[in-house]
Amino acid sequence: MNQVNKNLFSLKDIVKICDVKKVHVSDENKLFDYLRVVCIDKKYENDAENLLFFPIYFTDYDLDDGWVINHIDLRNKIAEIMEKNPNYTFVVEEDMLNSFDNEKYEYIVVKDILGAIHKLYEYQLDKVNPKVVAVTGSVGKTTSVGLIESVLAKKYNVLRIYHKRITPLLLKASIINFLTEEVEYVTLEMSIYFKDHVRVLSNLLRPTIGCFLQLDSSHLHKDGMDRIEDLAIYKSYIFKYASLGFYNDQDDYIKRISLKDNELYFDNEVLFKSKMEELLSFVDNVTIEEDGFKIDGNFVKPYLLTELSMLQYALAYRVGKYVGVETQDIIDALNSYVPVENRITKCKIFGKEVFFDGDVTTYERMKQLSKNKYDKSILVIRKFGSAENVDRFEKVVEYFDKFDTVYLFDDIEYLELLKNESNVKIVNNHDFLSNYDGIIFYHYSGYFRDYEEVKDENLFDIKNDGYKIIPYKGE
């Protein structure tokens, strides 16, 4: 999430919007400054003076459909939650009233908790009616959305929605709490874990502009998606309600999508009726230069020079041009952009500038970093993944030869799977950094997530030179 303002809802708002059966709140003029639908970030709950708590629950259907990975049933824990948070106001269903002291706590009775949340979501969305820019693809979505936000913010008020996995409930929680009346554009990514995810999200928050960045084998063999063609088809639902689509017509699979007579095709197969007026390439007239890109003749120096970043910057440029942001403002936004959400960051390790990757990704991230456009590059793997991704580790070595040298620390997991490539060197300290002047990619899987555990390693020179590592803050 990247917003400043939160919405205020009065008790009267809640009664009016939701199907409320009973109110047990002492102050009839009470204002709620945060509606805790699902945990977005603990800081919002901690900062709220008046919080309205919705004890949500996920069913087996939610698990089977891939939206959540664990059972959550706050409904049956309501008494425990109330005892720990007696200052909250709670939204409950009628059959929950026997679970707690009805006089001790403040509460609102509704017919259906999830139904009340949806009514609040629709109310807020209808009231503000923002334009929506949504991005799908296999990798690079988060950075693309961050770039688009930075470009649009030169002219418009923008709300960027981010979660590790955007689910319908997380989307609703974000819109309810942070879609203020000043917001003109919402930007977000739409990921696919099960085949209907993009379709469901697009139906829930209909894109004005749909963007399809690139495609590879990520998420294959889930929910019957056994071919990359399947991924292309199911992700293309980002275009179903959009007025405009941007697509990567240099991708072998995405280029097989076309728009004819208000119908979207994959090859010669009609996928669905579409409201799109145009489906446009965003990679036309884009070239890689010595230390950056040229887009329509305008030079851009990216934070990171890779084939993927060229696509990301070009997409943000095209979206900005289409919605009327001045060209120079777009270029300024792109040139000053710093990646969001701990994706990759510059820092210094033992005096050397490195691109530090502390996320938990392995194969997909290495693949994209290997496609960098620097004259000399090395990859350093200090910590590497976990057992659940071992199949991907074996694929990583396919990209080692794209780097001049790969340095593996001798205590990393799965060293035996990785060490036999011709350009690999095994090390047990950082002395090698002092003798290398190229671009360094330093991979420490899980660093942001495990920040408290590993911060004492003192890897980083965090002084007054602008370099910093931001610890992982959770969902």
Image (spheres, grey):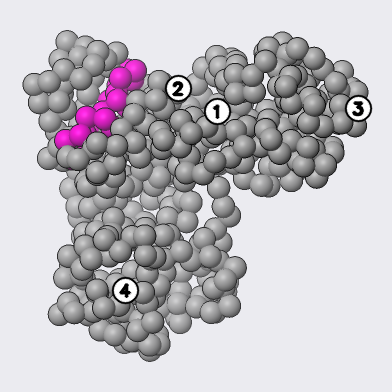
Q: CA distance from mark 3 to mark 2?
A: 38 Å
Looking at the rendered image, the disc whose residue lies closer to the viewer, 3 or 4, is 3
What's under tag 1, amino acid-wise? Lys
Tag 4's secondary structure?
Answer: loop
- The first of marks 2 and 4 along the sequence is 2
Vertical order, 3 against 459 (above or below): above
Cα–Cα gap, marks 3 and 4: 58 Å
Q: For mark 3, give the secondary structure.
A: loop
Tell me: residue 119, above or below residue 355: above
Residue at x-position 47% and y-position 56%: 342
- Label annotation for residue 204: 2
Say left or right for 79 vs 173. Answer: right
Q: Quadrant of residue 254?
A: top left
Q: Which tag is nearer the camera, tag 2 or tag 4?
A: 4
Which mark is drawn over residue 414?
4
Determine if the magenta segment contains residue 184: no
Q: Which residues are magenta?
A: 228-249
Q: Which residue is mark 1?
A: 172
Secondary structure at badge 2 equals helix
Residue 435 % position (x, y): 31, 87
In front here: 436 or 68?
A: 68
Q: Earlier in the sequence, mark 4 or mark 1?
A: 1
